[in-house]
Amino acid sequence: MTRQQLFEQIKEKESFLCVGLDTDLKKIPTHLRAEEDPVFEFNKQIIDATHKYAVAYKPNTAFYEANGSKGWESLQKTLEYIPKDIFTIADAKRADIGNTSAMYARAFFENMDFDSVTVAPYMGSDSVMPFLGFNRKWVILLAATSNPGGLDFQDVIVGDDGEKLYERVIRKSTEWGNANNIMYVVGATRPDALMGIRRMVPDHFLLIPGVGAQGGDLKSVCKYGMNKQCGLLINSSRGIIYSDSSEQFAEAAGKSARKIQMEMAEILQRL
């Protein structure tokens, strides 16, 4: 998917919502556990209830890998069920030496056909570049994450001018790709970082986790992070998919997604 195609979806749906499919067998409604593939059945109903309001879906692969080969089957079926005009993100946080990264890239882009994959940047250019060799595919590079432990390394000063490590990562990565194939992960709980990152990469899309269950504020994120083409994908996982644990779970998820979409529509009107 191209950047323009993604922006067209945002305009059409008046939304920049990404739904995180972090599906935990222990948290899905009990009535689904008798299904042949309860994870896929859960995802299927969530997608049915939310696809009108979402421009992206982001399965975190850990929740599927934990279930072994059956989990990978659930993930593949989920990916194939997502409407083709919706952006897909493999939240896998992969990267390794070059030939290994090339295999990871083939796995997610050729075999599974995701639009994008999250990538850890800390092994440098040769670990990231193999992911950038695919047409209309995206690298979503970890930058300033929302977890508390992210401060252990990401904010360490690495330059005489006060440059932080996550800023060095972003600055260096602009030499590897561009706004048409690289996005950045910036936590919603880091508005200080968000403002500076938007100055550094004015045209890039930013994937923003942490709105909702982790306490991030949508309006603050938009104030500091939005650009002329929106430039944001706001991820919500638990706040949507676990809105309810009864047999009406999907309906509740749809209502939660719709509520966020309505807020986003109001914000987009100001562009």
Image (spheres, rainbow, N blue to C red):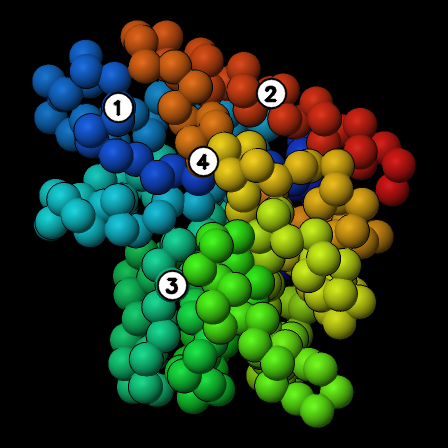
Q: Name the element at disc 4.
A: loop
Instruction: Give the mark nearer the N terminus: 1 vs 3.
Output: 1
Work out whether mark 4 precedes mark 1 in sequence or the reverse, and give the earlier one. 1
Read off the residue under disc 3: 93
Residue 152 location (% of width, % of height): 47, 68
Task: State which mark lies toward you, 2 or 1.
Answer: 1
Q: Are marks 4 and 1 in contact (CB under 8 Å)?
A: no
Front label number (2 vs 4)? 4
The answer for how far apart the CA atoms under marks 2 and 4 are is 14 Å
The residue closer to the viewer here, 101 or 146, is 146
User: Given the current orientation, which residue lies at the most extreme right position?
Assistant: 270
Residue matched to label 1 = 28
In terms of image quadrants, where is residue 172?
bottom right
Residue 208 shows up from this direction: no
Label 2 sits on a secondary structure element that is helix
Q: Alpha-carbon distance for marks 2 and 3?
A: 29 Å
Q: Could you give the CA–CA distance between mark 2 and mark 1, rounded to whole angstroms?
A: 21 Å
Give the answer, above or below, for where 112 lies relative to 8.
Answer: below
Where 61 sits versus 239, above or below?
Answer: below
Local secondary structure at mark 1: loop
Do callouts 2 and 3 mark residues in contact (Cβ within 8 Å)?
A: no
Residue matched to label 4: 237
Residue for badge 2: 258
Left or right: 269 in relation to 125: right
- Give the percent coordinates (x, y) of residue 131: 44, 74
